[in-house]
Amino acid sequence: MKYEHAPLTLVTVTERWSAFVLGDQSRQGVVDPPNKYQTETAAVAKEILDKAGKVAAAQNVPCKLTHVPNQSPAEGILTTAKNEGCDLIVMGSHGHRGLDRILVGSRAYEVLSYSKVPVLIVR
């Protein structure tokens, strides 16, 4: 039996900018804080996706690299899964429990709660 790799869609999501953070940057003299935020987060997303893409390429796994800007992580992941016709979402979790999860929230739990496809959460 020949094993065929399933295609992957690797996604990273950049959250919407915070008016509080951008206001603070503006007070510190940063010119055009929203543009700086977009530029910096796009660069970080590219770095993350490039590294993940290299790992997939080394294993001969076809993949699509996707950066979703200006969305909540769960929203971006779920929208991408729907648009790409994914049949499984695999994501990491920091493993927060109890009060930490209530205070911090769980993106993995949110994806798990709203996903129409199976979700595999890796600690």
Image (spheres, grey):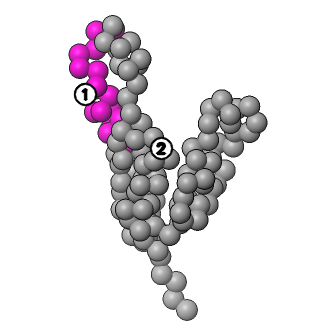
Q: Which amino acid lies under the numbered mark 1 shown in the image of this protein?
A: Asn
Residue 27 spot, x, y in % from top left: 33, 7
The residue singled out by tag 2 in the image is 73
* Residue 11 visible in image: yes
**In the foreground, 16 or 27:** 16
Residue 38 shown left or right of residue 118 in the figure: left
Residue 83 spot, x, y in % from top left: 37, 62
Q: Residues within 10 Å of mark 2 (few under 14, many from 20)?
A: many
Q: Residue furthest right?
A: 98
The residue singled out by tag 1 in the image is 35
Q: Is residue 8 above or below residue 40?
A: below
SS for tag 2?
helix
What range of the chain is rendered magenta? 28-45
Residue 89 spot, x, y in % from top left: 53, 61
Q: Residue furthest bottom?
A: 1
Residue at 45% over, 47% down: 75
* Disc number placed over residue 24 in the picture, else none: none
Q: Which is closer to the viewer, label 1 or label 2?
A: 2
Q: Earlier in the sequence, mark 1 or mark 2?
A: 1
Residue at 38% over, 65% down: 84
> On the image, which quarter does residue 16 sit in?
top left
Residue 22 spot, x, y in % from top left: 35, 19
Image mark count: 2
Q: Is residue 37 magenta?
A: yes
Q: Residues within 10 Å of mark 1 (few under 14, many from 20)?
A: few
Q: Is residue 71 above or below residue 2?
A: above
